[in-house]
Image (spheres, rainbow, N blue to C red):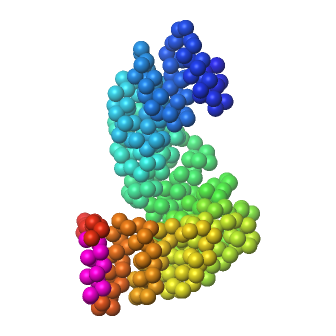
Amino acid sequence: MIVGYVNAGDVVEAKKLFDEMPKRNLASWNAMITGFVRFRDLKSARKLFDEMPERNVVSFTAMIDGYAKAGDMASARVFFEQSPDRDLVSWSALISGYAQNGQPNEAVKLFIEMQSRKVKPDEFIVVSLMSACSQIGNLELAKWVDSYVSQSSLDLRRGHVLAALVDMNAKCGNMDRATMLFEEMPNRDLISFCSMIQGLSIHGRGDAAVSLFDRMINEGLTPDDVAFTVILTACSHSGLVKEGCRFFDSMIDVYSLVPSIDHYACMVDLLGRAGKLKAAYELLNSMPVEPHAAAWGALLGACKLHCDIELGEEIAARLFELEPQNAGNYVLLSDIYAATNRWLDVSVVRNKMSERGVRKIPGCSWI
């Protein structure tokens, strides 16, 4: 009954029933904790966990999964280390958490540790590992994972496994391998096309990305807002203004999609890099909603690239209101002044940073 209420989305009734139970066993405690975790109520889940008379691997795994999905990887790791027994689900929860929360190196380290403990990973763990490799962009590691998967008993014909393999190889630069896997796929969907398009974009093959997007449409697939974000980004990175404008227009006129702030930001970046600053500025002002700071920041960067002082000053003034503590905006305006030898204005900007307590984070290089 507790599980039934949780599955029906009524965790309040589930807790009421749990409180009325004259005698509770381990299964009932775990069901209630899992219910709280499912609905992101970690405070209540933790309270029950601390009150449990006994715990097992299911109890610990529920808490690991809850904290990982909430982005609190430090707490998830503590529960993982405290667990007396770790099953495949607990390893998977932590590895997935690291991969999804921007800590791919930790995901890879944990996978290697799992291998050293002779724990055989399943397809879900391997897919999480491939996602982590995609974020790192490490070609050698990607080749190792690819080799491991090819020699394992995992079924590469399963859609999500093959899609992850294509995505990993594409983002890590092994485009030949990614292309071969992509062409061998029995059913190519929107996700696999976008993985290939993004891989081509990352590695400077904008023309090929555009051709693949057109092929995707010719094969009868309907692009969504994510697909348009991917192709507009590819056009921006490669300076393909004509193609980018074509896709942006088709998004509205052909597919009746409403461009998001991110789509507008891509177009501003594309037009700005190409020196079409006025067109980019007019596009921002035509947006149905207020542009976010990233969109204005992209145009300010373009003003620096093309030394447009007048427009740069106007955009910087907006950014100082939107992000008064973002040092990057001050530095960009200062660089625009410096490029035209307006050193007095450079000093004014630097003094403004000091008055507002804004500090530029110093960069570093491993070269």
Q: Is residue 175 visible?
A: yes
- The residue closer to the viewer here, 238 or 309, is 309
Taking the spot 58% from the left edge, 77% from the top edge, the residue there is 285
The magenta segment: 343-354
Which residue sits furthest top?
22
Q: Examine the residues drawn in magenta and state their main secondary structure.
A: helix
Within the magenta stretch, is there residue 98?
A: no
Check the image and report above or below for 275 versus 364.
Answer: below
Q: Which residue appears at 33% of the width and 82% of the height?
A: 335
Residue lying farthest to the bottom in this orientation: 341
Image quarter for residue 113? top left
Quarter of the N terminus within the rendering = top right
Estimate the x, y position of residue 61 in percent, counting from the top left. Answer: 45, 29
Residue drawn at (59%, 28%) of the image = 11
Split into 4 quadrants, where in the image is the C terminus? Answer: bottom left
Closer to us: 336 or 220: 336
Left or right of 287, for residue 339: left
Identify which residue, 181 or 244, lies in the foreground: 244
Res 151 seen here: no
x, y (%) of residue 321?
43, 70
- Using the image, determine if residue 158 lies above or below residue 342: above
Q: On the picture, is 141 further left or further right than 12? A: left
| Residue 181 position in % (x across, y down) | 57, 57
Where 161 sits versus 175, above or below? above
